[in-house]
Amino acid sequence: MSTRARVRASAVAVFGRDGLGASLRAIAAEAGLTAGRIVQLFGSKEELRRECDEHVFGVIREAKRDAMVRAHGSATTLEHLAMIDEYVPYVAYVARSVQAGGEQARAFIDHMVEDALDYVGDAVAAGTLLPSRDERARVRYLTESSLGHLALRLSFDAPQSAEELRSSMRAHIDAIMLPALELYTQGFLVDRRMLDAYLLYVGDPPESEQAASA
């Protein structure tokens, strides 16, 4: 990697492990450089954070698109499970960004929602995901739910090292994978009565009634 890419990777790892308040010195130690050299490369810690954000967005966007659109299936799922450790720094970075709260966290989540709208739309078009009556609302719900779960995991475990972080993220994946896949593939409610009642409440007739009146 170039020096700039090495610093960025180190920053993602340190921010994910220690939180966004981590110092430039901690990042420099991880990268094998001085804090002054990092300032020379990026100008400021804020600019380094901005580049980390863009890099993490890109990695997650491509991983999601690959899983949902390009090679959907059981083999792809197993490949991604085998690569979990490679994604740990990025997942932890996302969780820490959410934990930070405030306007920065809001903007971070909004960016992830916009990215998700793009690849979810492609997956719906490819026939690997079911469509939604309100795709933006669905994507925001799923994004905020998954990010909230991640932030809670790091709050509970508070990893103090890279190894503890990997262990925490692995435990998180192991804990959520079965229930998440069951919910996403089999559903939760045995019928659609609650959905139909809600659609009537908001003035949108259920699909079954629309078909009956057609």
Image (cartoon, helix red, strand yellow):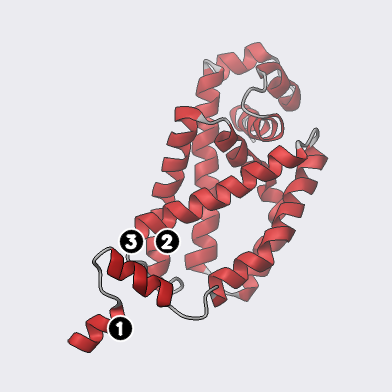
> Could you tell me if residue 72 is visible in this image?
no
* Mark before the other along the chain sequence, 2 or 1: 2
161 or 48, which lies in front? 161
Residue for point 69% across, 30% down: 14
On the rendered structure, is 66 left or right of 200?
Answer: right
On the rendered structure, is 145 left or right of 92?
Answer: left
- Marks counted in the figure total 3
- Name the residue tied to disc 1: 208
> Could you tell me if residue 16 is visible in this image?
yes
Q: Is residue 64 above or below residue 164?
A: below
Q: Residue 175 carries which label?
A: none
Marks 2 and 1, Cα distance to the nearest angstrom? Answer: 25 Å
Q: What residue type is labelled 3?
A: Asp
- Name the residue tied to disc 2: 120
Q: What residue type is labelled 2?
A: Val
93 or 39, which lies in front? 93
The crowding category of the residue bearing disc 1, from other C-alpha atoms within 10 Å (few below 14, some 14 to 19, many at least 20), is: few
Closer to viewer: mark 3 or mark 2: 3
The crowding category of the residue bearing disc 3, from other C-alpha atoms within 10 Å (few below 14, some 14 to 19, many at least 20), is: few
* Mark before the other along the chain sequence, 3 or 2: 2
Residue for point 70% across, 20% down: 28
Estimate the x, y position of residue 206 in percent, counting from the top left: 30, 76
- Name the quadrant of the C terminus: bottom left
Identify the secondary structure beneath mark 1: helix
Estimate the x, y position of residue 192 in percent, counting from the top left: 43, 77
Identify the secondary structure beneath mark 2: helix
Identify the secondary structure beneath mark 3: loop
Closer to viewer: mark 3 or mark 1: 1
Q: In this view, does 10 lie above or below 37?
A: below
Residue for point 70% across, 15% down: 34
